[in-house]
Amino acid sequence: MIRLTNTLGGKKETFEPVDEGKVRMYVCGPTVYGPAHIGHARTYIAFDIIRRYFEYRGFKVRFVMNLTDVHDDMIRRANEQGITIFELGEKNIKLFFEDMKALHIKPSDANPRVTQEIPEIIKAVQSLMEKGFAYETDDGVYFEVEKFPDYGKLSGIGHRKGRTGTRVDTDKYEKKQAQDFAVWKKEKPGEPSWDSPWGKGRPGWHIECSVMSSRHLGIPVDIHGGAVDLVFPHHENEIAQSEAAFGTKPFVKYWLHTGFLNVEGQKMSKSLGNFITIPELLKDFDALAFRFFIASTHYSSRINFSKTEMEKYKVTLGKLNEFIKRLQEIFGGEGDLKSVERAIESSKKHFVKEMDDDFNFPNAWSAIFSFESEMNKLITEGKVGREEAEKALAFLKEINSVFEVFSFETQAGLGLEIGKRIAERETLRKEKKFAEADRIRDELKAKGITLLDTPDGVKWRTENR
Ligand code: AMP
Ligand code: ZN
């Protein structure tokens, strides 16, 4: 039974999906006006782990992330670069997918783009107009917040009376209240636009997620996520316009929000020049070490990126990988299967208990660390043979299907291959075919793998270790 903290209501709730055994998950994607940064990486890795955990628990997940390719920032940046927003979007979306892949984030099942959803967005705006939730002004179509009594239920920031400012030009028809927000923006010179019942224009920001989420996942979705900065106004507005336009409540069952990532104690911002893009990060740190850093912090906690912190996580992950390698190097011997199975069972239970409890990443890691020390103890006691080592490795693979941080596959592949050669060499030595046995050792040596004959059996080292 998974429990999670729903931002709507602020309480821990038991997860009950709309469709048994399935999870419909929507995460607000990036505005693709520039390269993605490590703040995006934080949020998307955290949701990747949550998604993987649902899969680990047997749910079938459908995961959708939108790409905001029409936006004020897009228009500004495209103009600066002398290209269209379409060219700018194309370029950055390609980079975004590369970055997500480099970070081992599972691909989404769909990545709808605003530019490809305009007719649907217009339909939603029309529906708001027909139902009396929106009105037209000189510069756009606005959602009238006052008409939606539930406004504020997510963020606690409810109805606020207040005019837009002093009305200078009395002939101009402006928005009624400052809190009203644009669902359609009428064309300004030099801006991309589409035909609509209100003349040429483009969608407001919030409406896109209402439309894409309902179109690609239905209503309600189980989980709608983003970082905490989106709670207000973005998600508050999404609720208002979706529940108003589609007439179905709720629009989302569980709202999940990740904490913000700061860099060396400061908010990332253009003025401070402390933006770290994902390729910049990956020049200094391994993607898996960064994932480990994110995976070690509660998804909802604020997180501070610093190079010194990262170094620590790198070292700790290195030790865990050493532990994996230690298991992979056990090629023979009798062990105590019962003890190892007991260690696995209790660690698994601990891991699941913590992850079921609002995806408590850091506590889940304590289950893994105690497994490591328990196993190391059993190894020292001579209770781990090949069979036991394989069981332990299979368990760590299971964990890794959720966190995806261990350098497992390459080592396992290598370990298996070397293990086979070592076993062959041992047989030859038993048969006193020493020349042939030495040939295997030399062959491995040529590949940079050194065999060490130790009292605990044969071990191997690669040269770069
Ligand atoms: P944006 O590209 O700014 O529209 O943001 C896309 C997603 O990344 C949203 O879910 C944001 O909340 C999230 N996000 C942006 N900046 C950060 C950050 N510094 N830390 C964590 N999440 C972020
Ligand atoms: Zn959104």
Image: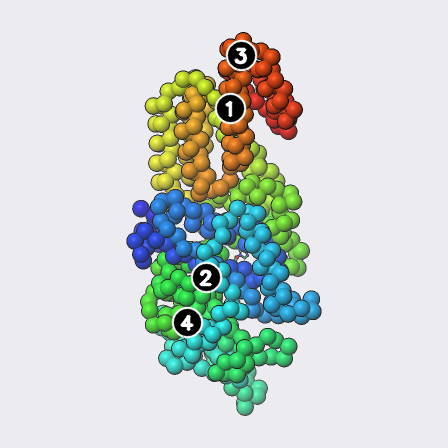
Mark closest to the chain's N terminus, 4 or 2: 2
* Callout 1 crowding tier (Cα within 10 Å): few <14, some 14–19, many ≥20: few
* Callout 3 crowding tier (Cα within 10 Å): few <14, some 14–19, many ≥20: some
Residue under circle 1? 420
Mark 1 residue element: helix
Residue under circle 3? 429
The answer for how far apart the CA atoms under marks 3 and 4 are is: 76 Å
Residue 316 found in image quarter: top right
The answer for how far apart the CA atoms under marks 1 and 4 are is: 62 Å
Of the pair 147 and 123, the residue shown nearer to us: 123
- Residue shown at 61% from the left, 59% from the top: 92
The answer for how far apart the CA atoms under marks 2 and 1 are is: 55 Å
* Residue depth check, mark 1 versus mark 4: number of the one nearer the observer: 1
Mark 2 residue element: helix
* Callout 2 crowding tier (Cα within 10 Å): few <14, some 14–19, many ≥20: many
- Residue shown at 48% from the left, 22% from the top: 330
Q: Do the numbered discs 1 and 3 sit on residues whose CB atoms are within 8 Å?
A: no
Q: Do the numbered discs 3 and 4 sit on residues whose CB atoms are within 8 Å?
A: no
Q: How is the image coloured?
A: rainbow
Residue under circle 4? 241
Residue 371 found in image quarter: top left
Residue under circle 2? 231
Establish if 405 lies above or below 123.
above
Mark closest to the chain's N terminus, 1 or 4: 4
User: Hey, what amino acid is under mark 2?
Assistant: Val
